[in-house]
Image (tube, grey):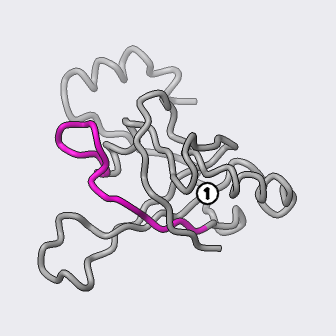
Amino acid sequence: MKKRLSLVISGQNSNCFVGLPVQITTKLFESAEKFPLPLCLRITWDDPQDKTNKKKKTKKTAFVGWAGDSSKQPDTLEIGTHLASCLSLLSDDARSPVVEDLEISFVPSSRIATVSSVQVEPKSPDDWEILSLNAEYMEQ
């Protein structure tokens, strides 16, 4: 199932999950056995940095999780400010999205690879300090 939605940035959403429109969440909850939570979504949008061809822009893709939240507005994908920033979906003023709409599709959980380890590389002295203070937690 593919669907085009408008993008809404929410400062109230402090996690890395997205909110879907009520009409989609209702259908997903009705068929919960097909779509176990959390659900992985593939989002695709036109790259706003691509100025070369106005008819066919370069597409960007990201995978996000949905854990049952509904967006407050119909036909919108609601995404937290921090996650939007990490995905380069937030404008320089950090107030509005850089894209107006995007396409979502559902990825069956059987197609999602499971990782056995993650490597973290600090970029600054502050990052090193945070890792040092939370080393036990990070090693779990």
Query: Residue 80, percent across and down?
Result: 44, 38
Type of amino acid under label 1? Cys
Q: Name the side, left or right, on which 64 lies relative to 40.
A: left
Say which quarter of the image contains residue 11: top left
Residue 84 percent across, percent down from the top left: 37, 45
Residue 14 position within the rendered picture, expressed as x and y whole percent measured from the top left: 48, 29
**Which residue is situated farthest in the left direction here?**
52
Foreground of the two, 87 or 57: 57
Q: Considering the numbered disc 1 on the image, is that residue within a helix, a strand or a loop?
A: strand
Quadrant (top left, top right, bottom left, bottom right) of the N terminus? bottom right
- Residue under the image location 25 percent in, 78 percent down: 57
Label 1 Cα crowd, 10 Å radius (few <14 / some 14-19 / many 20+): many
Name the quadrant containing residue 96. top left
Is 68 in the magenta? no
Residue at 31% over, 58% down: 99
How many marks the image carries: the answer is 1
Please tell me which residue is depicted at 51% across the width and 68% down the height of the picture.
Answer: 4
Would residue 15 appear left or right of 123 to someone viewing this image? right
| Front-most of residues 135 and 126 | 126
Q: Nearer the viewer, residue 85 or 128?
A: 85
Which residue position is annotated with label 1? 40
In this rendering, position of residue 4 left or right of residue 127: right
Magenta segment main secondary structure: loop
> What span is in magenta?
88-105
Residue with the most extreme front position: 74
Task: Tell which of 34 and 101 is nearer to you.
Answer: 101
Where is residue 81 shown, x and y percent of the image? 38, 36
Write the residue at 27% across / 26% down. 127
Residue 103 falls inside the magenta stretch: yes
**Quarter placement of the C terminus:** top right
